[in-house]
Amino acid sequence: MSDLIKQNFALYFPIFFATMWFFVTTLLGFLSGWFALMKAYPNSAEEALKTLTWQSGSMNTVSMRSILTLGVCPSGLRIGMMRLFGPFCRPFLVPWAEISVVRKDYFLWKMARLSFGEPPFGRLTVSAHVADRLAIAAEGTWPEPGPFVPETRKQTTSRVAKLLVGMALIYAALFAVAIFLIPRFMHSNMAGTPIRRDFNIGFDVLMLVAFLFYLRGRR
C-alpha cells in the first residue's frame, strides 16, 4: 500500500490537499456562523456605495486576515470573503436595522464589534478605523450617532506606528527567547550570525507590513 502511495504521490497529494482544504474551510464556515448568516440575510444585487476589499476581522472565534470584502449598500452592509478561503461562503447583506455596534479600546488597538440580529446570533469584529470608513460611506444610515470624521494622514501614521510597536515588542520577545533562553536548555551556541541575520530580515518584514498597512489606510 505504501509503495502504491509513493508511486502515485503526485496524483494523490493534490486530491488529499483539496479534500482537506474544503473540509477545513467548510468547518470554519460553521464555526464562524457564516452559513447561518447567509441563510438569515440573503444577498441581493443592490449596488454598493463603497466597497472595502482585503479587510481583516473576526467572526465569533474565527480570525479572517485580509480576506473580507465589506460593501456599504443603501439598505445594509454586505459581507463577503475571497472564495478561495470560503468556497461555500457566499456574501450576505445585513439590513442596517439589524446591526448594532460596540466600540472596544485595547492597549494598542481600537476595535468595533458589529452584532447582527436581536438578540445577536452573529458578530463581526473589525478595527475602529474600518468601522469609521464604513460609517462615513453609509451617510447617516450607520447604527451609531457619530459624527465620523475621515482619518487624517497624521492619525493614520500614529495608528500604524502603534501597530508596528506592538508587533516589534512581540518579535523582540521571541528573538530574546531564541537567542538567550533556548541555548541554555539546548547547551549550544545559537546566538550567532544566522539568528541575528534572521532577526534583521524579520524586522525588515515588519517595516514592510507597516508600510502596506499605511497605504491601505490612506486608500
Image (cartoon, grey):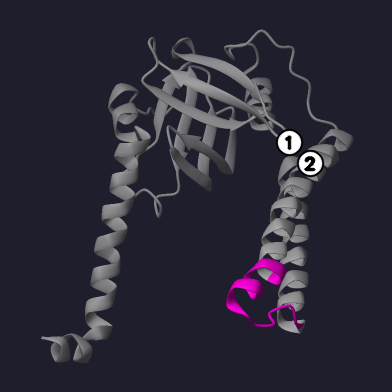
Q: Secondary structure at mark 1?
A: loop
Q: Position of residue 188 (x, y in %)?
A: 64, 82
Q: Position of residue 76 (x, y in %)?
A: 49, 19
Which residues are the magenta region?
A: 179-192
Q: Residue at x 27, y 84 (%)?
A: 10
Residue 108 badge: 1
Q: Distance of mark 1 from mark 2, alpha carbons?
A: 6 Å
Q: Which residue is mark 2?
A: 162
Q: Amino acid at mark 2?
A: Lys
Residue 219 shows in this picture: no
42 to the left or right of 125: left
Q: Which quarter of the picture shows residue 206?
A: bottom right
Q: Amino acid at mark 1?
A: Leu
Q: Residue at x 79, y 47 (%)?
A: 165
* Above/below status of 188 relative to 118: below
* Above/below status of 208 relative to 109: below
- Name the foreground residue: 98 vs 164: 164
Does 200 lie within the magenta span? no
Find the residue positioned furthest to the right: 154
- Name the foreground residue: 212 vs 181: 181
Q: Position of residue 185 (x, y in %)?
A: 59, 72
Does 181 lie within the magenta span? yes
* Above/below status of 116 relative to 182: above
Residue 136 shows in this picture: yes
